[in-house]
Amino acid sequence: MIPAEYRRTVVLLVKKTQGGKVRWLTTGDENTFMVRLKEFSLAVSYDSRRIDLNDTYSSYVTLSLINKQGGVIDTFEVVDDEETDWSLVNTLYNAARREALDITTAIKKFEEELEKDDVVGEAPGEAPQAKADEIPF
C-alpha cells in the first residue's frame, strides 16, 4: 500500500516521467532505477518472490527514499494484489525503466534498420556468444 504521505509524490512522478521531465538513472541492479534531486533521491525497484509451496509468485515494487549520504531513510513496497496502488507504482516503475534505458531511442534506431532495403540481422556466427546460463534475448 502506498502510504498517504507518498501518494502525491508518486502521482507527480508518474505525470512528470510520462511527460519526459524526469531524468531516471540506471543503478547497479538491472531492476532498480533512481532519480536524484538536490536533497534526496528516490529509487524504484521491481522484484518477485515465491509466496507458497505451489510455486506461486507475487510481484512487488519497492520505493526507497535516500538521503544525500546515500542512506535509505524510508522505504515501502506495493504488492501486485493491491490493484489500485499496484497500477500506479507499476506505471511509475515501467516509465522510469523506459526513461533510464532510453527505450524510445532504441525503438527508433531499430525501426531505422528495419526500414532499409538491406537484409537485417547478424548472420550466424557473427553475433557474440551468450554464456551457457544466459538466454540471448
Image (spheres, rainbow, N blue to C red):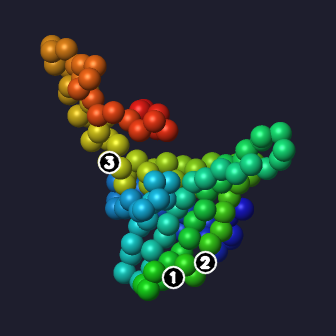
The answer to whether residue 31 shows anywhere in this view is yes
Is residue 56 toward the left or the right of residue 84 in the image?
A: right
Task: Read off the residue under disc 3.
Answer: 102
Residue 74's disc is 2
Q: What residue do we see at 77% from left, 40% from top?
A: 55
How far is mark 1 from mark 2, CA to CA? Answer: 9 Å
Label 1 Cα crowd, 10 Å radius (few <14 / some 14-19 / many 20+): few
Residue 131's disc is none
Q: Which of 128 and 7 is in front in this view?
A: 128
Task: Read off the residue under disc 1.
Answer: 71
Q: What residue do we see at 41% from left, 33% from top?
A: 136
- Which numbered disc, 1 or 2, marks the residue closer to the eye? 1
Is residue 129 toward the left or the right of residue 116 in the image?
A: right
Task: Give the image quarter of residue 4.
Answer: bottom right
Q: What residue do we see at 54% from left, 49% from top?
A: 91
> In which quadrant is the N terminus drawn?
bottom right
Q: Position of residue 116 (x, y in %)?
A: 16, 19
Residue 12 position (above or below residue 38): above
Q: Position of residue 28 (x, y in %)?
A: 42, 62
Residue 61 position (above or below residue 3): above
Q: Earlier in the sequence, mark 3 or mark 2?
A: 2
Q: What residue do we see at 26% from left, 23% from top?
A: 125
Q: Where is residue 109 in the image (x, y as percent from the top left)?
A: 23, 34
Q: Earlier in the sequence, mark 3 or mark 1?
A: 1
Task: Give the image quarter of residue 9.
Answer: bottom right
Q: Nearer the viewer, residue 40 or 45?
A: 45
How far is mark 3 from mark 1, CA to CA? Answer: 27 Å
Q: Circle 3 — which element?
A: loop
